[in-house]
Amino acid sequence: MWLPTSEKYRDFLDRYLPLHTRYVSGELTEAEWELWAEGQLRRVVALAQSGSPFYAGRLDGVDPASLTLAALPDLPFTTKDDLREAMHAILSRDLDEACFFYETTGTTGPATPCPRDQREVIASNAHVTEGWRNIFAEHFPARSPRVGIMGPTEVHSLGDTLGDVARNLGSAVAKIWPYSPVIGFPKALQLMRDLALDVVFCTPNVALSLAKAARAQGLDPRRDFAVKVFLVTGEMCTPDLARQIDQAWGVRTYNALYGAQESLVIASACARGQLHLARPNYVAQVVDPDTGEEFGAYGTGELVITMLIDGIKPLIRYRTGDLVDLRPNDCGCGIQGPVLKVVGRTRDRLRLGGRSFQAWEIEQAVLRGIDGSLGYQVVIDCDEAGEDRVTVRLDLPGGPGRELRQAHAGRVAAALGVRCDVEFLDELDPVTTTGAFVSWKAARIHDRRTAADHETEAARRLAGARGHQS
């Protein structure tokens, strides 16, 4: 692992690296973690009070030296709106200390600054490295694989973060952006073939769009490429969606990590396909998404995180807006940390037929029992009787017949409790490619019962002429 040589990081490295080593080996006790977490909580709050104009006001009156983990729920939440309003005022250290500057995509609002210093980079990448090491040992036991990284923008952290992780493991890396006007899908496919890439990191949509673009060029994704593993992130990926990627490419697809520009990497995948919380870096809490009521360290609800790394932008009691199921680790893969399953965003919940559904449940219903789909969209209408009806649009090559359409409509109707029609299309609305930039709901759901919200409008603007470029 690359480490900075500057003495100003020596104190952090001396404290963090031995703890990380014990954690990875499974030797770190619960008492040791609590001692670390409580000490870091006090350090982070003191830093934020002295260095962040936002937190100086928000945490006025809080005594960092007396803080305990049990008192954490007494601190106020930090929200996404806070980040947009505070902008640089939320930073706890000067920008001079940053080694990278990133920002959010800004698709649905102002792009918020997300600089990182060496402390944050080391701590975040260390846990992703262990996840990749676990997966690579499963699929490439005798060598280091060649990795292609496909990120969204030049000021996104993905390329730098995963480039460093690959370097930690001795893997060669090619950074390829298929939606870049310089690269494009044809060049991306050429590089994948010429370099015989073993692993590709991208969004689920990009994985399926690459398969569609390859077929448009007369290539067989399963035969003409060397890819064995897709590591996906940026959008929700249920096992049923991962299965479509597996079938298109003849690979194993992993929902590889969970995090965001502002929160860094919160959880990384193991070879068994589970996401594990990077526990030395965060205190995780689960709360009721509507009331903010505390559920505790485990359960199903909105994830709230407090960063334990005293870097340039530590967030305290940050409401991620994501619905998760957080459970004790019973995986057996060798990776430490609670197991985290992302259910969807709090804003992506939908009401159909008088019932509330999470994004995960809808995607599961749409793709369960379907093989070889390269994309989907759900259109929601309300008939004259006031009853909801859905139309599932599937990009499903091969011209499936009427029997499959009827059978699948019945499955979806049974799962969602509303009438359903199914359409098989050669091309879907390009808005379905925008999930990683905007939201799953804006990309996948066309709800004609209500006027388009700002996220839907943003997704439509972004879609433009997007799609595979053959």
Image (cartoon, rainbow, N blue to C red):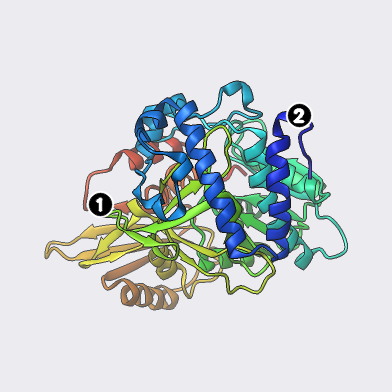
Percent across and percent down for residue 347 are: 33, 51
| Front tag of 2 and 1 | 2
Marks 2 and 1, how far apart at CA: 57 Å
Residue 57 spot, x, y in % from top left = 35, 29
Q: Looking at the rendering, which quadrant does residue 137 occupy?
A: bottom right
Amino acid, disc 1: Arg
Q: Nearer the viewer, residue 196 or 396?
A: 196
Pick whichever, 302 or 388, lies toward us: 302
Three-letter code for the amino acid on which mark 2 is drawn: Ser
Q: Quadrant of residue 394?
A: bottom left
Residue at 30 percent across and 63 percent down: it is 390
Q: Position of residue 356 (x, y in %)?
A: 27, 64
For label 2, the crowd category at 10 Å Cα-Cα, with few meaning under 14, some 14 to 19 and many 20 or more, is few
Quadrant of the image containing the N terminus? top right
Residue underneath mark 1: 448
**Residue 253 left/right relative to 106:** right
